[in-house]
Amino acid sequence: MLDATPTAAEARAAFWAELRRDARIVVLVLAVLWAILVVNAVAFGGELVKLGIFPRQTLGLRGIVFAPLLHGGVAHLLGNSFGLAMLGGLVLLREEADFWIVTAVGALIAGLGTWIFGRPTHHVGASGVLFAYLGYLLSTGLFERKPGAILLSLMAALLWGGLVFGVLPGQPGISWESHLFGFAGGVMAAWIIGRRRRSNVRSSVGALPRR
């Protein structure tokens, strides 16, 4: 009978291969955002920001799709890039599927919440998604109840817990609404993923042969 257990060398190779893939995804996402910023500035004179979320206007609903891709300028995107790389990278390290689920749920909830409750101005930027990553990282330990997930949540709280104050109003020029609802979307995504994983574990245990 062959032993299918990977060797230490094979496990290391698989780990580094996955890490390189995760890094490529982060770089690709940031490259797309920066390319859109340049095209908007050069070809459209910055007018694409009007595709952002405009609360309670029917046409403003299109911003749910476009707002995370658009930024008001270099400083705006530069401020989001580091957080997207660090927090998004940590989500990717858990599992690539988690990254896409958190991104999609976070963008949707951030967009809808901002459209319903936001101030009457154009809201653009990926910070809603950034806060979704934060919400996921801080709450995944609560919903999954596994040592790795709990450790990740504790580490995120220690290193980036102060970012939570970004959901509070009162900062001029900052869409705190997208921060707040993006964070809520991240928590919701953590609940969805945690519930799915617990269900998979119960199914696996139930499928074990009895003696």
Image: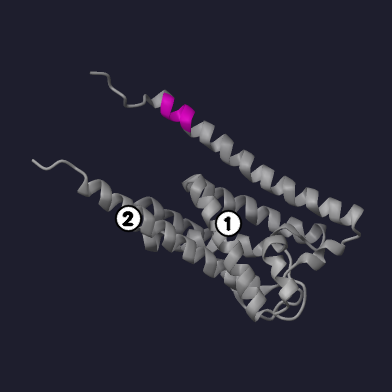
Quadrant occupied by the N terminus? top left
Mark 2 / mark 1, whichever is N-terminal: 1
Main structural element of the magenta stretch: helix, strand or loop? helix
Q: Residues within 10 Å of mark 1 (few under 14, many from 20)?
A: many
Q: Amino acid at mark 1?
A: Thr
Q: In this figure, which residue is indicated by the disc labeled 2?
A: 198
Q: Residue at x 77, y 77 (%)?
A: 121
Q: How is the image coloured?
A: one colour
Spatial CA distance of label 2 from label 1 is 21 Å
Task: Give residue 154's position: percent from left, percent from top.
Answer: 44, 59
The local secondary structure at tag 1 comes to helix
Q: In this figure, which residue is indicated by the disc labeled 1?
A: 103
Task: Give residue 127's position: percent from left, percent from top.
Answer: 66, 63
In the image, the segment drawn in magenta is 10-14
199 lies above or below 115: above
Q: Quadrant of residue 107?
A: bottom right
Q: Residue at x 90, y 58 (%)?
A: 44
**Between 5 and 172, which is closer to the camera in this rendering?**
5
**Residue 120 appears in the picture as rendered:** yes
Quadrant occupied by the C terminus? top left
